[in-house]
Image: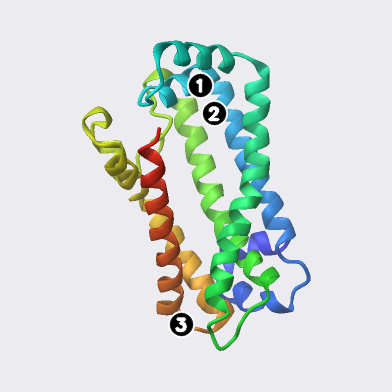
Amino acid sequence: MNALIEVFVQPGKLFSTLPERRAPWVAPLLANTILLLISTAVTVNVLGMDLIMRQRLASSNMSPEQMQLAMERAASPVTTYITYAAVAIGTPLSMLTIAGILFAFGMMTARAPKFGSMLAMVTLAFFPYFVVTVLMTALVMLAAPDKSALDINNILATNVAAFVNRSETSKGIYALYNSLDLLSFFEIGFLSWGFSRLTKAGFSAGLGAVSVMWILYVMVKMALSLFQ
């Protein structure tokens, strides 16, 4: 649990000592999941599933009948429970996936880490990011006089997509713009630093590994957006 505080005050030392710690990934993984569940709960209760689903379907290729059915399902409590379940399951899975990719890169370094240490680094590196984004998102939603004017995809407006017209932009390009996010770039840098401290491979090696992973993520995201 102390690691959640150390990541703010002495992250370099924390990342370097992860191999000597026992199961250091447990607390940050739980904390990250709880934070995203809280963020989801605030979003659902402040904006409502109706508005959330309406914005998600606005750029879809669904027929009017399919959209109407989706909106009716959005009003069901089951949809809300599924949303929470997706966050509770998806958060650990995403952390495991990122850790797995970086672990593969870490095996190529002089100080190949254990998977548990890499998972701990990833979850700890994401903890400050989630704390900041969850707090900022909650403040923006609660302070907004007109909730319906908020864009569920760009509530913080820290990415390029927040400043372009979605209806006039192709889906693939919009997905790319959505990925060009200021806070995400800070997270890329923090992950790169954590990788370098854990593997003793140097910041450039960490940045290279994280950048390759991010580029692959953006490419998949752009490809999937074409089928929405």
Left-right relation of 4 to 143: right
Identify the element where label 3 is drawn: loop
Alpha carbon distance from label 3 to label 2:
39 Å
Is residue 144 at all visible to an observer of this figure? Answer: no
Q: Which residue is mark 2?
A: 43
Which amino acid type is shown beneath numbered disc 1?
A: Leu
The quadrant the N terminus occupies is bottom right
Alpha carbon distance from label 1 to label 2:
6 Å
Q: Is residue 174 above or below residue 64?
A: below
Q: Which mark is residue 202?
A: 3
Pointer 3: residues within 10 angstroms few (<14), some, or many (20+)?
Answer: some
The total of numbered circles placed on residues is 3
Identify the element where label 2 is drawn: helix
| In-front residue for pair 200/77 | 77
Which amino acid type is shown beneath numbered disc 2?
A: Thr
From the top left corner, tell me how far across and down residue 118 is, in percent. Answer: 62, 70
Q: Residue at x 66, y 46 (%)?
A: 33
Q: Residue at x 34, y 43 (%)?
A: 175
Q: Which residue is mark 1?
A: 47
Q: Residue at x 63, y 22 (%)?
A: 79
| In-front residue for pair 100/195 | 100
Left-right relation of 149 to 195: left
Counting residues from the start of the chain, the first of labels 1 and 3 encountered is 1
CB contact under 8 Å: marks 1 and 2: yes
From the top left corner, tell me how far across and down residue 198 is, in percent. Answer: 58, 77
